[in-house]
Image (cartoon, rainbow, N blue to C red):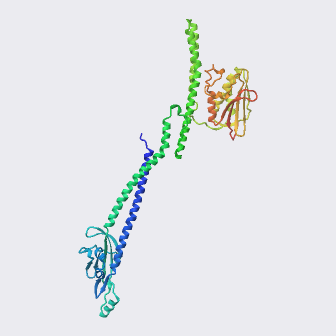
Amino acid sequence: MSTTSIRRTLLIRCGVGIGVLLFLLSAAIYLLVRGSLYRELDDSIKDTAAILANQVELEDESITYEWQEGIGTNRGLAEDALFQFWNEAHGTTTRSPSLHWRDLPKFAGVDGTPLMRSILLADGHRGRAVGLTVYPFVLPGEMTAMKERGRIIDPATLPHTLVVARDAEPVYHALTNLRLILAAGGLLTLGIGFLLVGRAIRSSLEPIDRLSDEVQARASHQLDEALDLPDDLPAELTGLARSFDVLLSRVAAIRQRERDFIRHAAHELRTPIAGLRATTDLALSQERDAAAYAGHLRSCQQTAIDLGELVKRLSALARIGQPAAPASMEPVDVLKILASSLERFMPLAEARGLQVADETGSEPLMALGDAALLKIIFNNLLDNAVTYAAPGGCLRLRGHRTEHQVLVSISNPTEDFPDDPERLFEPLFRRESSRHDAESHLGIGLTLSLEAARAMNGELRAGKAEDRGDLEFTLVLAAARHPVAR
């Protein structure tokens, strides 16, 4: 599977961003300079055209170009200016000295208004030109003379087309050089930007590299330890690192559970295996008759049965805590379920001479819970109470409701009260009085009951009854709002 490098992705994206920014900036500079140069050139052409437009005079019934009269004193106009007049009335043309015999393109705007355009000069150079229509001017003295002669000529009947041009090659060369400078500067800036951005990215990702090295360098016995987060770890990655710490804590819990499982399994297997070995050693220690061997074989068979039940116990333990279907939380009458479970154990209680004191009352006791899980809990609690109660003792069932909770307790007298009653919920924990009943008790009933109570957001506690000192288990659940008839 191909992997994506954050460093490479950031470098490429930053490089593309810098490149786009440089391109836009270079384009803006180029367009501004280009507009400025062309505007300056066009303004110069228009100024020249304005001067020349006022130098066409009607004098003695003929056209006089005053620029020709001052040509000797205006060397720049004679050597550099490119312009041409077309007398539309007579079909003649007059060129500037620098044009020699070559013509400029003839054009003008609508109704003779000035029109600026790019042209190709006769020498092959690119140029800019303005074309417009001009009319000769008449001095007051000439107008008086025309009236005296009785022949007045209207200047509007003598239109001239004037085209003034300038060589734009210097502008084109300047713009070409500018493009080269901007391109070279942009590439150089882009290269330097790549180096600087790459260095910044490497520096920013160093905490991640150190964190990765720390994870890879860990030994197998360190997998459940929290990470030593670098002080300069970016804030955007702190949440990810802490989530990884949470995952490691879960791994630690699983590893601890595995260790506990192995410890409990080894402890439970030690006794039957030792008994099996002792029986076989005794049977093989001397010659025996068939009846003696049969007795030892029956003992081995019983040990094998005990081992089979122990395997069942270990298999059930391995399933504790695994994800299961969520509890179906609904209002249930816990006393009704308790009474149903009690009926199953009454024959065994009578056989052991036990009395049952039901102090729960006749009113329903409604709680939020799962009927199936409640049945598992009550069956396990009653089974333990009937099995391990002192002979001739009395089992007590009690239940009551507080403002927000429902409490149900089952207590029984015992001759083997544990030093720490909460240890009864540990997987495979069994008191000395229960070491020889592997066929009927697997040592995980209370563990399963605790898991069931937690699945209903409840509690299951073990302790000593306040009034008589009996072993008491108390189930605590959330009370239901609307009780129903029992």
Q: Is residue 47 above or below residue 9?
A: below
367 to the left or right of 170: right
Q: Seen from this angle, which residue lies furthest right?
A: 467
Looking at the image, which residue is at 31% across and 67% down? Answer: 169
244 to the left or right of 151: right
Q: Seen from this angle, which residue lies furthest bottom?
A: 148
431 to the left or right of 43: right
What count of labels does the image hold?
Answer: 0
Looking at the image, which residue is at 28% across and 67% down? Answer: 125
Q: Is residue 5 above or below residue 434?
A: below
Residue 81 quadrant: bottom left
Looking at the image, which residue is at 24% across and 75% down? Answer: 100
**Residue 174 visible in the picture:** yes
311 to the left or right of 132: right
Q: Position of residue 25 (x, y in %)?
A: 42, 59
User: Which image quarter holds the N terminus?
Assistant: top left
Q: Which of 82 and 441 is in front in this view?
A: 82
Residue 152 quadrant: bottom left
Q: Where is residue 232 in the image (x, y as percent from the top left)?
A: 52, 45
Q: Position of residue 393 (x, y in %)?
A: 73, 22
Q: Which of 376 and 444 is in front in this view?
A: 444
Q: Which of 129 and 300 is in front in this view?
A: 129
User: Which image quarter holds the C terminus?
Assistant: top right
**Residue 344 visible in the picture:** no
Q: Position of residue 131 (x, y in %)?
A: 32, 75
